[in-house]
Amino acid sequence: MNLDLSNKYIQIEYDSSNNLMYNTWLSTTSDMTDDEYREIAKIQIQEIETNNPYKWLVEMSKLDFFLCPATQEWVDALFPKILAAGVKLIAFVISPNIFSQVSVEQLMDEKNIKNADFEIKYFKTKKEAEHWLGDSKK
């Protein structure tokens, strides 16, 4: 597995043998600003476009950040790039923080994302998410 990015908020890794991108949000996200979140989102998109993973695991159990509505809309506009890169399975390991969890679920409930050609599942543990993604042979 290659470590593509590590900063105080996130680690991004790509496992080429499993065609899987890992994004692990860190507990320091309570200090993150909307602008910092947007910069990280841009980097995530660049990594996805570079590596073209079929599977994407987003580990958010330590995420302590609430997306404001304007940032939710901004992130929503990025999803066509994710789909164009070939991502078909997305596993979210969700935060016990109800505000962060609701923020992610609202983002994924947008009409144009719901009708897209990929599958999203939410998990309580990374192990459960990896098991689901591992069942996909792509």
Image: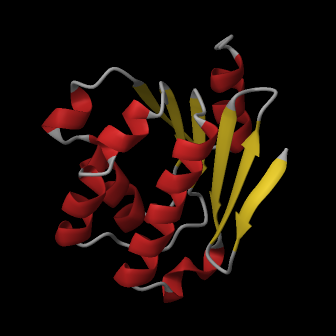
Q: Is residue 81 left or right of residue 123?
A: left
Percent of width and height locating residue 68: 24, 73
Total marks in image? 0
What residue is at 82 percent from the left and 50 percent from the top? 2
Residue 65 image offset from top left, x and y in percent: 43, 74
Q: Is residue 65 visible?
A: no
Of all residues shown, which one is farthest toward the right?
1
Q: Looking at the picture, tell me which residue is in the foreground, 79 or 132.
A: 79
Which of the colour schemes (rainbow, by chain, secondary structure, one colour) is used?
secondary structure
* Residue at the outermost front position: 50
Residue drawn at (48%, 53%) of the image: 45
Q: Which picture quadrant has residue 33?
A: bottom left
The image quadrant where one finds the C terminus is top right
Q: Is residue 57 above or below residue 66?
A: above
- Left or right, 103 with respect to 115, comes to right
As drawn, 115 above or below 99: above
**Any part of residue 80 in sight:** yes
Residue 39 point in image, percent of width and height? 45, 73
Q: Residue at x 47, y 31 (%)?
A: 121
Q: Residue furthest left?
A: 111
For residue 11, side relative to residue 33 (left or right): right
Q: Tell which of 78 and 114 is nearer to you.
A: 78
Question: Of 121 and 53, which appears nearest the observer?
Answer: 53
Extreme residue toward the top, this view: 137
Q: Residue at x 24, y 62 (%)?
A: 74
Q: Residue 134: x percent and y percent?
A: 71, 21
Q: Quadrant of the N terminus?
A: top right
Residue 124: quarter of image: top right
